[in-house]
Amino acid sequence: MRILLVEDDPSIAEGIRASLRQGGHAVDHVTDGGQADAALRDHGYDLLVLDLGLPGLDGSEVLQRLRRRGKGLPVLVVTARDGLAERIRVLDLGADDYLVKPFALSEFEARVRALLRRVSSQGKPELQLGRLRLDLPGHRAWVDRRPLELTAREFGLLEALALRADRVTSRAQLIEALCDWDQELTDNGLDIAIHRLRRKLDGSGTGVRTIRGLGYLLEELADAGDAA
């Protein structure tokens, strides 16, 4: 999943970013409200983690602009503003959840999983293609009852393909899903990830097919050799 983190405190941002990346997510980080508003207009995200007390635009204004554009992107507000009236105000503006600083990273991670569970595959936390099954919030995959041992990047690649299993996914879409602004993914890096994923899917009845000039398609295979 691709997440936008809007936080101007470097130490808090680094802890959140490390936690999200460890969970297999691509994270873009900005430090003021204007940058956040621009990123939300120019890029697609699965979750927004938003501080309120920001330079430039206040986080509340970022949230209002997002909702005025008709975007249903889930928003987790993380802020030091602790008060019932403030919580109600922000939730009424369109936030999906509200977490007061300081907080335990384990609670933050649980809130993130809950929000992503709502939107994964149009509200379905699991995807299945033939014998292959994915638990999206848990970042786990199985073939029948056998767990697949996947790196975070390999799972992200499999997830991006599985969410578009009925259509071709371009290389640009895969790179967008797998990288963030601080960790660029090269074409060669994508080729390596696809090669490793194909090897781990070998014998599963599901493969990654190359559609020349267009991209890749995750599909059930009559013959595992068709994945090449």
Image: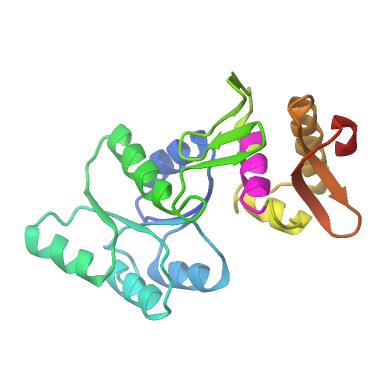
Pick the residue in front: 86 or 181: 86
Q: Position of residue 215 (x, y in %)?
A: 82, 55
Toward the left, the furthest residue is: 84
* 159 in the magenta segment: yes
Q: Position of residue 100 (x, y in %)?
A: 20, 48
Q: Residue at x 41, y 67 (%)?
A: 72
Describe residue 138's horizontal placement relative to residue 155 as left or right: left
Above or below — where is 172 with respect to 196? below
Pick the residue in front: 77 or 31: 77
Image quarter for residue 50? bottom left
Toward the bottom, the furthest residue is: 68
Residue range in magenta is 154-164
* 152 in the magenta segment: no
Image quarter for residue 228? top right
Principal secondary structure, stretch drawn in magenta: helix
In this picture the colour scheme is rainbow
Above or below — where is 21 with respect to 122? above
The answer to whether residue 33 is seen in the rendering is: yes
Q: Residue at x 62, y 41 (%)?
A: 156
Above or below — where is 215 with respect to 68? above
Q: Position of residue 125 (x, y in %)?
A: 46, 43
Q: Position of residue 25 (x, y in %)?
A: 53, 43
Pick the residue in front: 85 or 203: 203
Describe residue 59's horizontal placement relative to residue 209 as left or right: left
